[in-house]
Amino acid sequence: MGSGSWSTNVYDAAARYRAASGTDAFAYSDHVTRSAPRSSWRAHQTLDPYGLTVRESRDSAEHPTSLAISVLFDVTGSMGGVPRVLQTKLPDLFGLLLRKGYTEHPQILFGAVGDATCDRVPLQLGQFESDNRMDDHLGNILLEGGGGGQMTESYELALYAMARHTALDCYEKRGRRGYLFVIGDEMPYGKVKSREVRDVLGESISRDIPLPEILAELQRKFHVFYILPAGASYAGNPEVLALWRKLLGQNVIELDNLDAVCETIALTVGLGEEAIDLAAGLADLEDIGSTVVDSVARALE
Amino acid sequence: MHTLVVDFGFGDAGKGATVSHLCATADRPVPAVIRFNGGAQAAHNVVTPAGLHHTFAQFGAGTLHGTPTHLSRFMSVDPLALTAEADHLSALGVPAPYALLSTDRRAPLTTPYHAAANRLREQSRGSARHGSCGMGVGETTAYALAHPDDAPTAGDCSSRPRLLRRLRLLRDRLTDELGPLPAPPIEAFADVCTAFAQAVTLTDEDALRALVRRGPLVFEGAQGVLLDEWHGFHPYTTWSTTTFANAETLLAEAGDTAGARRLGVVRTYTTRHGPGPLVTEDPGLRPLLPEPHNGHGRWQGAFRIGHFDAVAHAYAAEVCGGVDALAVTHLDAPGRCRRLRICRAYGIDGRLVERLPAGPPGDLARQAELTAELLGARPALWETPGPDPRCWSDTISGLLGAPVLLESRGPSRQTVRPAVPRPVG
C-alpha cells in the first residue's frame, strides 16, 4: 500500500498533459513566438483580418434568435499575464450565458487588439460561433506582447473593423444591438488612420476617421463596453478611465479580479437583455457557486 | 446496487483486483468508480489476464476496462503524480486516460510543497516515524483543516491568479514552520495545474448526483480500515477516513436511494507497510510469500508479513459498523505456504484477548493505549484450516460474520471469481 509508485518531474509534467490531451490553450501563440523571428509573425489564418469581408452573426433553424457578443482583448505587453488568463477563462462565457438563460442563442466572437504603429499583428478577429469553435479561435490568438509604451493602443482600428465588417441578424432583423466588450488597459488613438486600415485590413478608405465618428457608427450595432482589469499595467489609471468614460459613459467597467471576467460579461448581457436586475444576477452567481460574486458586484454597482 | 469496497487490513489486501473485477463483470457498464478517501499514495495493483500490470493510484482500478473515475471531494488530487500514472496507462493501451477522469472542484490539491513538508517532518521524527509515504497526502489534509478558506483545491487549477495566491500562501506558511522546502518554484507547478485543469473534467457538486442516477457505482476505498484516522492504531495511522463513512456520506448527498453493498476485502495473510502494530508478524513468511509489487518504501519502510489476524480484521468490521460481504484474496497462498495459520486471539499481559472493542471516533488517547497494548500482544490461539482454499474462505467468513462474495487466487492476482454466497457461521 502506498508505495508512491507514480511521481514525475514538475518541469515536464505540463508538457506531458498537453501531449496526452492534445489541447494546448496557447499552442499557436507559443509555436509562433518561439519558433519564428518576430518579423515573420502572423495572425492565425482563421483570425487574420487582412481582406476581411464581414464577420456574420446569423439566425439559423437551430438558433432562430441569435445574439452577437464579441470580446476583444488587448494582447500588448502592458497587459502582463492577463491575456493568458483570459484565454483560459473566456471559454466558460458561453456556458454561463446559457446556464441562467440570460440569452437563448448567444454567438460569440473573440478577437485581440495590439498596436498598429509597432506590432506585427495589431488586430485579430475570430468568427461569431455558437459552439466550441469559439474556443479554437481563442486558442489561436497570438499573444504578441508588443505595444508601445505611450499608453495608447489601436483600439480604434478594432472598433472600425467591428463597425464596418460585421453583419448581425439580431440588429438587422430584430433591431436589437449586439454586445462588444473591449478588455484593455490603455487608450485608443484619436482617429482611424487610412494607412493602417490599408496595411492591416487591406482596404482603402479615402480619409482618416475621427474616433467619436467611428464609435457612433459602431454603437448603432453594438452596446460597447470597456473593461479595465486588475493585473494590467494601467489598472485603475485615472487618465485611461477618464478618456473611456468620456467615450462610453457608464459602460466602463473596472474589474478587480480577472477571474470574474466571464461572470461580469454574462451579467452585463443579462442586464442589457433585461433578463435580470443586478441583485438577481448576483443571486444567480451565488446559486451556481461562483467564487467571484463580490468582485462582480463591485464592478457593476 | 452500488458496491463500497474497503480494505479490512492495513492496505494491500486486493481492492484493485476486486474493483477491477466488479467493473469487468457488471451486468451493465459501471458509470464510474468513485474514489472517496486518500490520495495519490494509493497503490492498487491490477494484473490483467493478458499479464498487463498497473499500480492504480488516482485512476480507479476499473480504468483498464474503460470505466471512468470520479475523484470526490474527499480525495486529495496530485496533478504531478497523475501525469506519470496516465503515461503508464497510455502505454498499456488506454487511448485517452484523462478523458476517463473527473474531479470534484472541492477536492484538496496535493502539491510539491506538501510533499516536501511531509518529508521534512518524517525525517525529524527519526526512529519514531509514522510510516508515511512521503507524498504529502496527510500534509494536504492537515493544511486544508487548518486553513479551510485558502487551501488550494482542484478547482483552483482553472484560475491561475487564485491558484498562485494560494500556492504562495501555502509555501510561505510551511516554510515559516519548517524552513526552506526542497520544492520547485510556484510558477512551474502552476503551469502543471493549468494543464491538469484543461486535461481532466472539473465538476461541481451535481456530478455525483448525475452519476448515481446513471446506474450502480463502485466506490473504491484507499488504504485500510486498520489505518483509519480515528479507529486505527494511533499514531501509526493515515490522515484519512478509511471506513465506509465517506462513501455513505457522498451517496446521501447525491440523494441516493438505491442503497449500497458494503464489501470488505481481506487477504489470507495480514501485511503492513512500515511501522506500527502487526501482532501476527512472522519474518519467516517473507521468503515463502514473495511480493512482486510491494517493495521496501523509501519513506514508508519495510513491507511486513504476518499470519491472518482475525482479531484485527473483526475489529475492522466492527468499527465500520458491519459488513454485507467479503472478498478474500490470495487464496492460493495457503496451498503454497503450508505453515500459514489464522490467529484467533492474542495474549496480552497473560490475558486471552479475542476481541478488540471499538471506541468512539476521535478518542486518540484511547487509540494510543490500544496501540501500546497491541505492541505487547502475541498470538495466543491459532486456527489451521489446512491447504484447501475453500476451508480458508469458510473459516474467514465465519470469523468475520459475513458471506464471501468474491475469491481470488493466483500469484499475480489476475484470477478473481465470484464465490457462491454462503450463509454466515
Image (spheres, grey):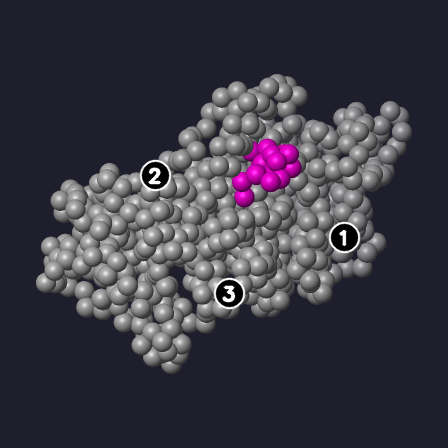
A61 relative to B340, above or below:
below
Left or right of A9? Residue B382 is right
- Say which residue appears at 47% left-offset and 50% top-offset: A299
What residue does disc 1 label? B323
* Whether marks 2 and 1 lie on the same chain: no
Give me the C-alpha separation between circle 1 and circle 3: 42 Å
What residue does disc 2 label? A233
SS class, disc 1: loop
Q: Quadrant of residue B145?
A: top right
Give me the C-alpha separation between circle 2 and circle 3: 33 Å
Residue segment shown in magenta = B136-153
Point out the frontmost of discs 1 and 3.
3
- Say which residue appears at 74% left-offset and 38% top-offset: B230
SS class, disc 3: helix
Left or right of A227? Residue B257 is right
Q: Position of residue B140 (x, y in %)?
A: 58, 36
Asked whether residue A137 appears in the rendered view, the answer is yes
B159 relative to A289, above or below:
above
Amino acid type at image mark 1: Val
Instruction: Tell me the subunit letter for badge 3.
Output: A
SS class, disc 2: loop
Q: Position of residue B111 (x, y in %)?
A: 50, 36
Instruction: Tell me the subunit letter for badge 1.
Output: B
Determine whether label 1 and label 3 are within 8 Å by CB: no
Amino acid type at image mark 3: Arg
Q: Nearer the viewer, residue A41 or B195?
A: A41
Instruction: Tell me the subunit letter for badge 2.
Output: A
- How many numbered markers are drawn? 3
Give me the C-alpha separation between circle 2 and circle 1: 61 Å
Locate the N terminus of chain A by quadrant.
top right
